[in-house]
Image (tube, rainbow, N blue to C red):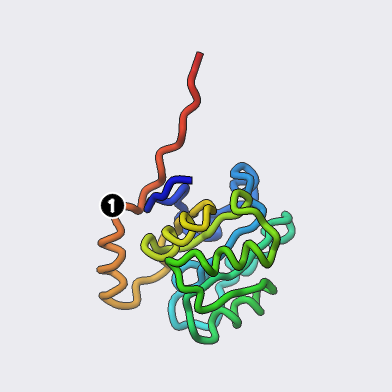
Amino acid sequence: MSFSLLPERKFRSVVDITPEVLRDLGVELLILDVDNTIAPYKTLTLEEPVTAWARGMKAAGIGLFIVSNNKGQRPEVFAKLLDVPYIKRAGKPSPRGVREALARTGTPPERAALAGDQIYTDTVAANLAGVRMLLVEPIKFTNIFLAVRYFFELPFRREKPQKRSASI
């Protein structure tokens, strides 16, 4: 797999990623970032649409697994709320945490995707681990530094061009 800073697909929110989209991509495990992907920074609660979405994913047979760089209690709190496994201090953009999630679930990389909001951590980690990257818009800018970082990601916040099959 070639390396790219571009995500495979873009979504407004994690709840816009449906089981049908994942099935079409051949994905059976969705790895989730925490901060600004499933919850805004600093909160310890999840909005009802996110918990309902997670229940729907699991009911459709899609596995969920949290992989977060967060060092605090948030990954564990959200993992308990969603009843999913988690890894914190993942060290993204290193693919280590993503690869550990794949190993713990026995999922091959081509059957997994990572949903996250950042190019320089989430997209790089996904691409280095060989999983699909599904970029979501950040939930909320909480400070100027986040806004600046996202500004520098703008050139990469578009989908990879899809391969076209040759027509006869």
On screen, residue 44 above or below 112: below
Q: Is residue 104 visible?
A: yes
Residue 64: x %, y % from top left:
64, 64
Type of the residue with mark 1: Pro
- Residue drawn 42% across the image and 59% down it: 124
Q: Position of residue 120 (x, y in %)?
A: 36, 63
Q: Nearer the viewer, residue 106 or 153?
A: 106
Asked if residue 56 shows in the view, the reply is no
Q: Which residue is mark 1?
A: 155
Image location (x, y in percent) of residue 119: 38, 60
Residue drawn where x is 60% and y is 68% of the image: 100
Disc 1 element: helix
Residue occupying the far bottom of the picture: 73
The tally of labels here is 1
Residue occupying the point 49% across, 46% down: 1
Where, by quadrant of the figure, is residue 103 drawn?
bottom right
Instruction: State the residue at coordinates (43%, 63%).
Output: 117
Q: Residues within 10 Å of mark 1 (few under 14, many from 20)?
A: few
Left or right of residue 4: residue 65: right
Residue closest to the eye, 7 or 125: 125
- Where residue 46 sits in the image (x, y, percent)? 56, 75
Placement of 161 over or under 46, stated as above or below: above
